[in-house]
Image (cartoon, helix red, strand yellow):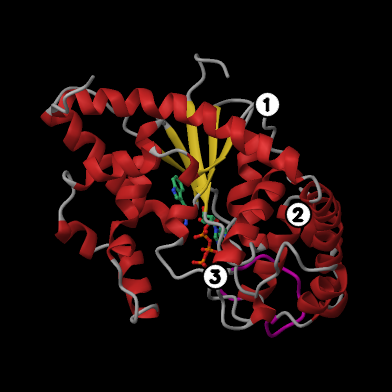
Amino acid sequence: MEESKKVLYSAVQPTNNLTIGNYIGAIRNFLALQNDYNCYFAIANMHAITVRQTPAELRQRTLSLLALYLACGLNPEQTAIYVQSHVPAHAELCWVLNTFTYVGEMERMTQFKDKSLRHAENINMGLMDYPVLMAADILLYQTEVVPVGLDQRQHLEIARDIAQRFNNIYSPTFKVPEGLYVKVGAKINDLQDPSKKMSKSAENPNGSVFLSDDKDTVIRKFKRAVTDSGSEIKFDPENKAGVSNLLSIYTAFTGKTVEQAERDFAGIGYGDFKLAVGEAVADKLAPIQKEQAKLLTDKTYLDNVLRSGAERAAKAANKTLSKVYKKIGFYQL
Ligand code: ATP
Ligand code: LTN
């Protein structure tokens, strides 16, 4: 990794099956950035356990997410890809940063409030501490750029606040990170309810297209997608939310512009349009799925990627951690 490049950090939780929203909104953008930045991509299993997980599934999804990162084209020679719990510095810095974070701030976080409602039987300290662990993730690497969806903006703001607070009390220790938000139009909505974002944990599985869906399933879900009144295929998110979402998906998957897509579909009925979008998505997913399945048969290779990723990450992370320990007065041997 070249020292002169800026550091970029992002992570995805190995929970549920990923959707085409995660792919377009997050993973696919990592690819375009890996050449320009010194990148770290984590599999955030410590964040995942803030909501109860089935152990065997969490383990399996960790490897699946790694295989997916690789199948999408992330290059482990270039980029450190690792599992969060393999680098103990995350938990260690989180503890220190906890003492620079106020309970009131955490109680006001939108995601904490949402998840407390959804998991009322398990409002654990980890759920509340989620943003501080995320701040530790980011700040450990002297990160400058964090590509995430807009839903993560509040978490990024807190990471910036904590960094500035620490830097002001001691002396400049952490870089203050910037969020890199995907362009408008890259927010993929639910196929059954285009007013909601497509989500891994949606109630209606027909609304979300999973990266693991086979061709028939993808086509079936698109055929059933909700469209709008009228018959014109036009990008107009306010009045034609369903058609516009399908056009966004189509352009994201084919690289065509909205104008080109509108021209391609001029005079075509909704049925054929939905089929064409489904085919474009299925065709793009097929080689990724094939490569992911192939990678998953080579556990030795995957373990090696994770081992070397964790080593590289730990080296950078421990440098920052040791600076922090020194500044706060931890006696060092
Ligand atoms: P859940 O539904 O379980 O809350 P999620 O689908 O929102 O999960 P996360 O793991 O929270 O997934 O997010 C991973 C990344 O994918 C984040 O950067 C997030 O902003 C992005 N992302 C998630 N859903 C979409 C979407 N529908 N469109 C664009 N980006 C998305
Ligand atoms: N909360 C994030 C996942 C995440 C993350 C991070 C993203 C954990 N640590 C650090 C960027 C930087 C999400 O996308 N749900």
* 273 shown above or below 45: below
Q: Residues within 10 Å of mark 1 (few under 14, many from 20)?
A: few
Front one among 289 and 89: 89
Tell me if 247 is positioned left or right of 33 in this view.
Answer: right
| Disc 3 C-beta below 8 A from ligand 1 | no
Residue 57 has which mark? none
What SS does tag 2 mark?
Answer: helix
Residue 227 magenta-drawn? yes
> What is the distance, in whole Å, between disc 2 and disc 1 at their CAs?
26 Å
Who's the residue at 70% across and 32% down the image?
Answer: 75
Q: Earlier in the sequence, mark 1 or mark 3?
A: 3
Question: Which secondary structure type mostly characterizes the magenta part of the structure?
Answer: loop
Where residue 251 appears, x then y in whole percent? 73, 55
Q: Amino acid at mark 2?
A: Phe
Of marks 3 and 2, the one in the foreground: 3
Q: Quadrant of the C terminus?
A: top left
Q: Residue at x 75, y 60 (%)?
A: 250
- Above or below, 182 relative to 14: above
Which residues are the magenta region? 226-239
Q: Which mark is residue 253?
A: 2
Contact, mark 1 vs mark 3 (Cβ under 8 Å):
no
Q: Amino acid at mark 3?
A: Thr
Quickly name the residue at label 3.
54
Q: Which residue is under mark 1?
A: 77
Snapshot quadrant of residue 240: bottom right
Which percent across, then down, holds residue 239?
A: 59, 76
Q: Is residue 144 magenta?
A: no
* CB contact under 8 Å: marks 2 and 1: no
On the picture, is 61 further left or further right than 123?
right
Place of residue 282 in the rendered image (x, y in percent of width and height, measured from the top left): 83, 62
CA distance separating discs 1 and 3: 32 Å
